[in-house]
């Protein structure tokens, strides 16, 4: 952990040290200031009152460049420590690019779904409420990208494991146990070659079709809960290693863009009845895939996705069903010469059934000035989305980019 | 002798036919084909400044770096937005095919999402980034997509031009017809009127600057005016470079994420 902090600090300070030369060629300085406030519909309690200063600093010298993205948040009247969202060094070559440091790595073809997008963990502290760009966390490591025009091979080595931030507060999900357990503190894996995370992706961009194949040996970003004692029930979060391999593809068929993404996860842990599974979980293989399409009708842009999770060799004492079906639906349209955008993104769970509807209106009041407002509406009483039925909310804010 | 006279008559007829063909006016289709086939260089790079002007005269400026190239039968274009700040780094790539009936391939990269996404190229009638240009207006529309008629000659900004009326073969097209003034000297369209489905004038395009760079006629300044809405879009190309050897591999997913 200290080494990681030291590496990130060195890269961050290197970039900050270059600030005085922003006037020179190769230096760039931009970012945004954003103010955002949101309240729950039921009771009107504020759930977010946030001001953010997001800075993007870069300096390019020949084939090398530095980049840092420090973010300063003030939330509910308190200034939080500076968050270094990304800080890395880039080396660019004719056939090989290398990026070292804290970085976000985004894979896959799905919108709002993370089947092969498994390198960067997620900040789910407020579930799926923030914009997707804010959900992703950076990982610290090295990425090697061999490229020859339309083909590329990415190799990623992450010596340190970065877990996802799990939902908390009003977003804490129901625990997968009949009685509420005592949750002991979990531990993160130490640094070693064996504990590193390793990913590879081959991608090809061609006429009418884009294809990528990926694989990884990594730590699950969210922990399984291991039963420590049954009476009273006490559990301990455990991170564990697993392997996955998958594909992502998109292509054009007439006016439709067709997308698909799928992955096989080996020995993933699924919670089950402690009476049947002494550890509180069982290891099972899982298949996840999605099929989707994007198209336009009369200026409206539509996107549809169907997602299926299948637990292989499923047993009835597991908490999750053998098959889980989810769909997403997005419709967007711009008005006033693209200065006003109206978008509705919806998740639908088939089992409960339940849904999350996220309408948003964005107005580009002037170049760089964006005023936005939105809502999130949960439908249903149970399931991934319905469990938050009491958390419907609205928000509004402004963002000035510079 | 008789044979000799017959030969002379045949020669005269041949010469007259050839001379008539030489001075006959070309067809509208041939002229539009000549515009389409005009040499444009193997590749090109430049900075595009796009100024959107609303009906009240308020201006918004977008700055876009772009590279273009032809590789075999595929025309490739990569555009990367430099400003304003909220769209900086956004890139758009288009592969266009000479093969008749084959749709373009298009991708967009949004830096906030850090992901390249394939998008449909069927919305060619959609307006480009809030401008008065549709994607079709900006592309090289194949001459076979319209029926062309040469309607006369006129002078535009001192240049003698052919006037050609073009009617889309596909009734679903955005315009009912267009009229184009093509420079006789340069095979460059200097002016074009677009008529809506009702036959009313919708937009006028004027080219105000054409330069001969590295053996190629390049349109450097153009303005599209929507006469029905009162809005305009001005486009200006600067730092134009021709045939600098841009590699095919410059038009890739990696290039979209790296920027230009």
Image: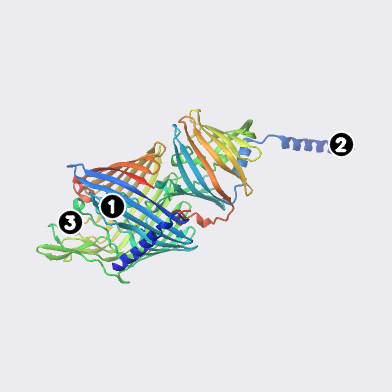
Q: Secondary structure at mark 3?
A: loop
> Residue A31 at what x, y percent from top left?
37, 50
Question: On the rendered image, what quadrant is the N terminus of chain A found in?
Answer: bottom left
Position above or below: A305 against B19 = below
Q: Which residue is mark 3?
A: A175
Tell me the residue at 57%/56% (across/down): B245
Q: Position of residue A98 (x, y in %)?
A: 43, 64
Vertical order, B121 against B245 (above or below): above
**Label 2 SS:** helix
> Marks 1/2: CA distance?
100 Å
Subunit bearing disc 1: A
| Along the viewing direction, whichever of A141 and B77 lies nearer the viewer | A141
- The verdict on a common chain for dots 3 and 1 is yes
Q: Which mark is residue A73?
A: 1
B63, above or below B10, in the image: below
Q: Residue at x 17, y 56 (%)?
A: A175
Closer to the chain start, of discs 3 and 1, is 1
Q: Quadrant of residue B36?
A: top right
- Mark 3 or mark 1, whichever is nearer to me: 1
Q: Chain of mark 3?
A: A
Residue A360: numbered disc: none
Residue B235 in sight in this render: yes
Tag 2, which chain? B
Q: Looking at the picture, do discs 3 and 2 lie on one chain?
A: no
The residues bearing labels 3 and 1 have C-alpha atoms spaced at a distance of 30 Å
Q: Label 2 belongs to which residue?
A: B5
């Amino acid at each position: 952990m200290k080494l990681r902090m030291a590496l990130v600090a060195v890269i961050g300070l290197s970039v900050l040290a270059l600030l005085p030369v922003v006037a020179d060629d190769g230096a760039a300085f931009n970012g945004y200031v954003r103010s955002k406030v949101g309240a729950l519909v039921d009771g009107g309690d504020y759930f977010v009152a946030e001001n953010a200063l997001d800075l993007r600093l870069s300096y390019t010298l020949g084939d090398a460049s530095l980049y840092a993205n420090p973010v300063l948040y003030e939330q509910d009247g308190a200034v939080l420590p500076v968050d270094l969202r990304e800080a890395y060094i880039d080396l660019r070559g004719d056939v090989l690019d290398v990026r070292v440091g804290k970085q976000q790595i985004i894979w896959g073809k799905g919108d709002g779904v993370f089947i092969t997008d498994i390198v960067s963990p997620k900040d789910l502290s407020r579930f799926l409420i923030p914009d997707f760009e804010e959900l992703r966390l950076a990982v610290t490591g090295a990425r090697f990208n061999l490229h020859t025009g339309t083909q590329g091979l990415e190799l990623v080595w992450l010596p340190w494991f970065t877990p996802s931030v799990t939902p908390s507060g009003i977003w804490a999900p129901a625990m997968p146990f009949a009685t509420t357990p005592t949750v002991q503190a979990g531990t993160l894996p130490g640094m070693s070659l064996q504990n590193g995370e390793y990913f590879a992706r081959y991608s090809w961009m061609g006429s009418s079709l884009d294809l990528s194949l990926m694989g990884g040996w990594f730590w699950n970003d969210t922990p399984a809960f291991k039963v420590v004692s049954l009476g009273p029930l006490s559990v301990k979060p455990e991170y564990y290693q697993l392997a996955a391999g998958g594909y992502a593809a998109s292509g054009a068929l007439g006016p439709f863009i067709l997308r698909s993404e799928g992955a096989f996860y080996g020995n993933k842990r699924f919670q089950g009845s402690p009476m049947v599974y002494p550890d509180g979980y069982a290891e099972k293989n899982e298949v996840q895939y999605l099929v989707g399409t994007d198209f336009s009708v009369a200026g409206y842009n539509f996107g549809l996705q169907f997602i299926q999770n299948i637990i292989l060799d499923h047993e009835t004492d597991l908490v999750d069903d053998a098959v889980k079906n989810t769909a997403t639906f997005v419709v967007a349209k711009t008005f006033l010469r693209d200065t006003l955008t109206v978008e509705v993104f919806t998740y639908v769970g088939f089992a409960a059934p339940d849904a999350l509807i996220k309408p948003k209106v964005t107005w580009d009041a002037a170049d760089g000035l964006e005023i936005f407002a939105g809502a999130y509406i949960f439908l249903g009483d149970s399931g991934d989305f319905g469990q938050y039925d009491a958390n419907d909310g609205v928000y509004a804010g402004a963002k000035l980019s510079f | 002798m008789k044979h000799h006279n017959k030969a002379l008559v045949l020669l005269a007829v041949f010469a007259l036919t050839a001379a008539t063909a030489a001075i006959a006016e070309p067809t509208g289709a041939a002229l539009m084909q000549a515009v389409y086939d005009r040499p444009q260089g193997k590749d090109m790079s430049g900075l595009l400044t796009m100024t959107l002007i609303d009906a009240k005269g308020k201006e918004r400026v977008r700055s876009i770096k772009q590279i273009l190239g032809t590789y075999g039968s595929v025309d490739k274009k990569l555009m990367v937005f430099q400003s304003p700040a909220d769209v900086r780094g956004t890139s758009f790539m288009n592969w266009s095919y000479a093969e008749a009936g084959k749709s373009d391939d298009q991708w967009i990269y949004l830096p906030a999402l850090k992901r390249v996404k394939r998008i449909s190229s069927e919305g060619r009638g959609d307006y480009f980034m809030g401008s008065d240009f549709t994607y079709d207006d900006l592309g090289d529309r194949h001459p076979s997509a319209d029926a062309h008629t040469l309607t006369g000659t006129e002078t535009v900004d001192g240049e003698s031009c052919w006037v050609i009326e073009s009617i889309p073969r596909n009734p679903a097209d955005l315009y009912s017809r267009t009229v184009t003034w093509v420079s006789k000297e340069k095979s460059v369209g200097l002016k074009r009127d677009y008529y809506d489905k009702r036959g009313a004038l919708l937009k006028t395009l004027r080219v105000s600057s054409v330069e001969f760079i590295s053996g190629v006629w390049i349109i450097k300044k153009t303005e599209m005016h929507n006469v029905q809405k009162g809005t305009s879009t001005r486009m200006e190309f600067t730092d134009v470079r021709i045939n600098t050897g841009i590699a095919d591999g410059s038009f890739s997913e990696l290039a979209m994420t790296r920027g230009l």
